[in-house]
Structure formats: C-alpha cells, structure tokens
Amino acid sequence: MGTGRSTKGTLRGLWISLTIVIVASFAVLGFFGWQIHQKAPPLPQRVITEDGVVLFTLDDIQDGKSVWQSMGGQEVGSIWGHGGYVAPDWSADWLHREGTSLAESIARAEYGQSFEALDAPKRAATEALVQAEIRKNTYDPATGDLRVSSRRAAAIRATASHYDGLFGDDPTLGSLREAYAIPPRSVPDPERRRMMNAFFFWASWSCVTERAGEPVSYTNNWPPDELVGNRVTAPIVVWSIVSFVLLLAGIGGLSWYFAAKGHEEEAPPSLLPRKDPLLQLEPTPSMRATVKFFWVAAALCMAQVGLGAVSAHYGVEGSGFYGIPLAEILPYSVTRTWHVQLAIFWIATTWLATGLFVAPAVGGVEPRFQRAGVNFLFTCLLVIVVGSLFGTWYSTRQRMGLDASFWFGHQGLEYTDIGRFWQIFLFVGLVLWLVLMVRALRPALARRDEQRTLVGLFLLSSLGIAMFYAAGLMWGRHSHLSMVEYWRWWVVHLWVEGFFEVFATVIIAFLLVRLGLLRPGSASRAVLFSTIVFLSGGVIGTFHHLYFTGTPMPVLALGAVFSALEVVPLSLIGFEAYGNLRLIGLRPWVTSYKWPIYFFVAVAFWNLVGAGLFGFLINPPIALYYMQGLNTTPVHGHTAMFGVYGMLGFGLMLFCLRGVSARFVWRTGALSFAFWAINIGLAAMAFVSLLPVGIMQSIASVEKGMWYARSAEFLQTPLMDGFRWSRVLGDTIFAAGIVALGYFLLGLRTGWSLSPQETTATPSLPPPPENPEELSGTPATLPPLAGGN
C-alpha cells in the first residue's frame, strides 16, 4: 500500500511540475512574442531621397515580399540567414553590394580613385564615411518616411539594376544564375522585379540600421560585414559564454541524478512473457486500414530522397541534371521545396498512422465508423500532398496572382511552404485525426489503472500535434517578416521538434508495455520525467532560431540559455541506446523486433550526434552569428531531421507492420542492408561533404563576411566543387538503403519478405501484467524526446 501511495505521489508531483513548465514557458514565449511585434524593424510608408524622389513605398515592400515568396522564397537563397544555401543570402548580398557601390562613389568623389585602388588610410576613411551614412537611422516614425541621401539612392539603384538583370534574362549574368541555380526570367515581370528589389532593400536596411538609441542594428549586427560596420557585439559573446557554462552545469546535474537514481536497478524481470504477446493481437479493421498509410509513406520517402539528390546536384550544375535540362521543368526552387515538404509528409504520416494503429489496441475497443474515419483521413492525405505539391510548382512559374499564390501556391517559407488553403486543409485533417484518437483512447482513460498516466500523456501530445500546427495560420500575406518567423518557428520547433517528440516517446512506451518489456508505472514516470526535462529547455529554446530576425536583445539571451539546456538530456543518450540493445537479449522472441529496436538505437545515436553535437555547434549566438545560413545548418538539419525523425518513423512503421504480421517470420536480409546503408550513407553525406563545406564557409565568414561565404566567387572554386561532388558517395549508399527498405516493405505485401514458417500462437498467454509487483525489474529505458534543436 505504501509503495502504491508513493507511486501516486510521484506521478502527481511530476504532473504538477509538467504543468508549471508548460504554463511558465509559454507565458515567456508569448510575452516576448509581443515584444518582437513592438520592436521589429519598422516598415516605412515611403523610401525617399533628400530631393523628395520616391524610391519605394510600403506597398512595394510588402508586395515584393510576396513576389519573393511566390518564386520560392526561402527555397531560393535566404533572408536573415533562413532558407536555402545554393543562392546567396539576399539581405547579406544586397547589403554588401550597396555598401561597395556607396564606397566606390565616395572614393571617386573624395580621392578621384576607385575604392579598390585606395591605400590603407584612405580606404579606412572611406569605410568610416560609408558606415556613418549607411548605419544612421533616418526613419521618421511621425511621417513613416525613410530618407536616404542622393549618393545612397544611386547605390540603391545600382544594386537594384543588378538584381533586375539577375532575375530577368541579362546574358552577362548567365554564369551567376547558373551558380545560383536560378533559371533565366525566374521573375519575368519587370514590375514584380522592382517590387522584390524594394523588399530586398528593406531586409538589408534592417541588417545595418541601428536601433534608435542603441549602437546595434535591428538584426543584432548580423550579417558580419566589416565594410558596413557589422561586427559581433558584446552581448553575443557574453551570452554564448553563459550558454557554455549552463550546458556543462546541466550535464553535471543530470549525471548526478542518473548516478543517484539510475543505479537503483532491480533484478532482471522474472515473469517476462515467454512468447510474443502480439501473437494474441487480432488487428481491428481500423488498425488494418492504417497499413496503406505506411505504403504511401514509403513511396513519399523514396521520392523525397530522389529529389534530394537532384537538389544537391543543382549545386554543381545549376541548370540541369547531368546534362538533362531538368531546371526548365523542375528548377531548384521546386525540387528543394518538394524535398523538404515530402520529408514532413512521410515522417508525419508514419507517426500519425502509428497513433491510429496503437489507439484501438490501448483502448481495447473499436469505435463505430473508426475504419471509415481512417479511410477518409487517408483520402484527405492524398489530396493534400498532390494538391500542395502542384500548387508550389505552379506558383514558381509566376503565372498566379500574389493572393492566389499565397492561398494555393507557394508561401516561400521553409517547412511551411504550402499555400494557406492547404495549410487549413491539413489542420482540419489533424483535428479529424485527434477526434479518431480520442474516440479510441476514451475507454483506456476511463480505466483507473497504471496505464492511465500514459494514456493522459498520449492524449496531451495528440492535442498538441493537432493544435500547434495552427501556429502556421497566424500570419497573413502582409504580416511583418519578424512575426512570420516567430510563428513559423512555433511550427518547426514546437510542433515538429516538440509535441511530435512527446507523442513518439509515449507511443514507444506503449509498445514496450504491450510487449511486457516495461512496467506501466515505470514507463509513466520515465515519460513524464523526459517530457519535463525536454520542455524545460525546448519551449523557450525556440528563441535560438530568432537571434537575428529583427528581435530585441532579451530574445537572444533567452535563446542562448535555454537552447543550451535543450542539449543537456542528449548528453546521456547512451543510456537509451544501451537499454534498447538489452531488450533484444531478454527473450528469444524479442529478436523478432530486432530491426525496429535497431532503428530506435539509431535514433539515440543521431540524437546525440545530429541534434546534440551538430545542434550545439550552431546554437550559441557567437557560432550562429558567423554560421547562420551556411552548410553547417544542413549538417544539423539532415542528421537531426532524417537521423532522428526519419529513423523513428522507420522504427514505428516496422513495429506496426510487425504487429499486423506477428504470426509470420520476416526475411530480414534486405532490411539489414537497408539499416546499415541508410546510417552509413547519412554519416558519409554529413562528414565527407556537408561538414567540410560548412567549416570552409565559416572560416570565410569570419575572415571576410557572410556575403563572401555565400558568394559564387567562393562556392564555385575547384576545392568547394570537389567537396560538393564528394557527396555522391554518401548519397549513393543512402539511396541504396532506401531502395532496399522499399523492397523489403513491398515484400511484406507480395510475400517475398515473409518466411513460409508461421509462428505458433499461444491463445492462453496472459496479457502483460499491470501490477508492478508482478515484474521485478525494468531492464529497458525509454527513448528520451527525440530531435533536440
């Protein structure tokens, strides 16, 4: 009795702690969201010269943002460091070109020489004049006018002329377009190009113009560029040091906790099931209906990998694919968009389908019309995937109006590229999925047994998945870019990297409990503790994506502190890998789940490497100041996104398919090859190509500036070309693994992945015990929340 009361008290304390963490974290996130809204770079009503000539209007800037989004937006270069990596960061590139043009004008006027011909003292004097003019805040909040000198207006016009030719069809810029993987006439309408130039000017103006009363620009002096006086600030250095110290302190504290609690191990379980408990499982009609989700997810995954190979190749051949003029039909802006969106689609599909598969088994009841609901949801999925991908492609052809492009085409925002109509459709689909989950789990929630806590977390995470995608509906076509980024990272960081992780952790716990490998009480405590630890840093840690997006300094400080705390639980990820590997040897029948468990071990590995090491590589403000928008970001992106979420998707898919075919023995030769090839290929992709390119770019960014690290002048050198071509090795191995996995999955349908031998069922086998006293130990550990940063 005392143990039962103690367990209930522990769970109650954990639930209270989780509630405090969620309420406090979102209060901070909401308050500083309002601060970002208040202190974002102003949008001028007019940009005018000293003589009163109007260069741009507010409508030009806002419609120019829409033009940029409609052609691919963050999938074609980047703004404020967020976006693609083949083309330049347009805010950094415009800023340096405008600064260079202004320096040339001053040098000619003052010394009668070109800027490049000046000696060191004259060059320094010219740079000082450039900085004095370009950094001064001449925005008048009373009138909404932004005044520039005639000399600066000439520099703006010269820069705009370059961009007009680049996005048009100036033949002298053909090699530059090739390097940027931008087709000729990517924006064929001259008026649209003029408006897009207005937006590029404003984005770069925000990067260099000092806030009123502060010696720092709206983007905290990002990007680094000595010519215009953008240098690292003291707070960036100080808060980076604080984040290092907190990381070490957090690792020390968590290690102490594990040392104190983790070694209170009990003896190995004496009553583990002698045979696979899933042999008794008779999948319900709705559970069987989820299988087609996994086939579609596998097909989308293969398409995503193929598009990734094409997108990577555009980095060395911007207009084609091994001589095939593919860019005329599928330019880089489209292939990268589809590559990113398909990753979200297929990974989310595996996780949502796993929820639909597990829920009736947990609830013990098949609700009426559950199968019809699952089938309807599947139809919605197909419509959303096909419709949104077509819309993003058609938008880049520049044949849609700006409003139509926003609603049905391309929003140009990485990970949230699809049009608003498709976003709403997807949100409605997620709400329908939530309804199906609640209906199936309600009987389990009504039972007051030890699984009730897990069921509650299951419902909480399901609610988060459905509701937090609504953050992607919080901006409009003319919303301020700083607020768009704020809400976009709610989707990317909190939806994908937050509540999906809680959901996945709970699902894995249910699977292990169902197999009798974990006690419900132990699983509940482990999941609650993992959720608290992750969300303690993860929610406010969202701010580390917003250091340089027009946000005030406290956002940078909070992002630095809490993003360091995000990495803390990943430092002890080896406990998870060790625990999962131990599962395989507990009983002979557990080997049937060897490969799903191996994928969970891979999740642990990539959590440490991709989310932990590569995540913290770019998380501190001082690192991100020089690295934001460089190839160090896709190192983290690929190893955390595919390495963690993708591997987890594969593991969950295999677990569910194992449940459907529990009475059959799998032939796992192809699956074994797939596992090792996918992991080795991903490692080769990161370490042989992406990381060296990112390191070289980082050195260039420190020495010369962000504009140079992203320039064709630097990226098209033979050395950098060689590094990009070296990616073929990893990509080929990785793709072979994906094909092998697809072959194995297809074999489950056709029969070639199944052995003629059938496992003997044991009808008298009891279900996994719910009384914690029946199992004397807990040999396994629960996977911590996956993904990190």
Image (cartoon, helix red, strand yellow):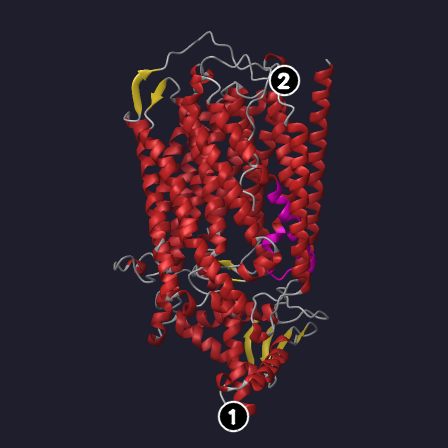
Residue located 70% across and 73% down the image: 142
Q: Earlier in the sequence, mark 2 or mark 1?
A: 1
Three-letter amino acid code of the residue under disc 1:
Gly
Where residue 223 sits, quadrant-wise, is bottom right
- Comparing 364 with 354, the one in front is 354
Residue located 71% across and 34% down the image: 17
Where residue 133 sits, quadrant-wise, is bottom right
**Is residue 265 positioned above or below 480 on the image?**
above
Local crowd size for mark 2, using a 10 Å CA cut-off: few (<14), some (14–19), many (≥20): few
Whether residue 200 sits left or right of residue 547 in the image: it is left
Q: Position of residue 293 (x, y in %)?
A: 40, 33
Residue located 68% across and 30% down the image: 260
Does residue 70 appear in this view? yes
- Say which mark, if any, is on residue 112: 1
Secondary structure found at label 1: loop
Q: Position of residue 551 (x, y in %)?
A: 64, 60
Q: Is residue 548 magenta?
A: yes
Whether residue 636 sits left or right of residue 222 in the image: it is left
- Say which mark, if any, is on residue 681: none
Whether residue 184 sits left or right of residue 600 in the image: it is left
Which residue was labeled with disc 2?
A: 449
Residue lying furthest bottom: 112
Q: Is residue 720 magenta?
A: no
**Is residue 249 positioned above or below 143 on the image?**
above
Secondary structure found at label 2: loop
User: In which quadrant of the rendered image does the N terminus lie?
Assistant: top right
Most common SS among magenta residues:
helix
Q: Position of residue 678 (x, y in %)?
A: 38, 40
Span of residues in magenta: 543-568
- Comparing 573 with 5, the one in front is 573
